[in-house]
Amino acid sequence: MDRDGDLVVCELQYSGAAAAFLGAAALATIAVIAFTPGPASWRIVLATFVACAALEAIHAQALRRGPRAASALAAHGRAIQVRDGNGRWCAGEIRVGSFVAPWLTIVRWRPAGGRWDRTVLILPGMAAPEALRRLRVLLRWA
């Protein structure tokens, strides 16, 4: 078990599994839209919106850029710092509701002075195995 004095640092990387999941979810949504009754023009607009949103999400996930894209995190007890895609670090606190499983880690945190919680999804392969293991232990016991 990680002691309160241990610092866990995870550099997040591109995940082909996340991109494949986003693509599959978009295709499933487009299939539902295609078979939903209604005007064809509305279905085309909705399907185009879903496709564009999925491409943007996959592109942002691949590049790890933008104000909300986490590229690294450092956790110490319940304190956390998250580096966004622009390279800025934001300090905050780990919140109740984080989830830990061998196939998925969800870090729920709130920036200092922020109103709303944010979430960082981490799949296997997105971080070094030892750092990811230490993060899961910290989240389970924090």
Image (cartoon, rainbow, N blue to C red):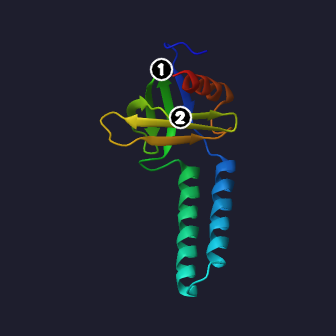
Assign a secondary structure to mark 1: loop
Give residue 23's position: percent from left, percent from top.
65, 60
Reading the image, the residue beneath label 1 is: 77
Q: Residues within 10 Å of mark 1 (few under 14, many from 20)?
A: some
| Residue occupying image coordinates x 65% and y 71% | 32
Q: How many numbered dots are placed on residues in this image?
A: 2
Give the quarter of the image for residue 26.
bottom right
Instruction: Give the amino acid type for the residue marked by disc 2 in the picture.
Output: Ser
Q: Please name the amino acid that badge 1 sits on.
A: Gly
Return the x and y of residue 70 as percentages of the image width and height: 49, 42
Tell me what residue is drawn at x 40 percent, y 36 percent. 110
Place of residue 82 in the rendered image (x, y in percent of width and height, measured from the top left): 45, 35
Badge 2 density bin: few <14, some 14–19, many ≥20, Cα 10 Å:
some
**Would you place residue 50 above or below residue 90 in this image?**
below
Specify the quadrant that holds the N terminus.
Answer: top right
Return the residue found at the far left: 113
In this rendering, the answer to whether 94 lies above or below 103 is above
Q: Residue at x 58, y 74 (%)?
A: 47
> Which label belongs to residue 14?
none
Report which quarter residue 46 is drawn in: bottom right
Residue 71 lies left or right of residue 34; in this view the side is: left
Secondary structure under the numbered disc 2 in the rendered image: loop
Residue 9 location (% of width, % of height): 54, 26
Q: First in sequence: mark 2 or mark 1?
A: 1
Identify the residue at horizontal 58%, vertical 25% (top origin). 140
> Which residue is disc 2 drawn over?
98
Verify CB contact (< 8 Å) between mark 2 and mark 1: no
Cα–Cα gap, marks 2 and 1: 13 Å
Which mark is nearer the camera, 2 or 1? 2
Q: Quadrant of residue 81?
A: top left
Up-down relation of residue 131 to residue 89 (above or below)? above
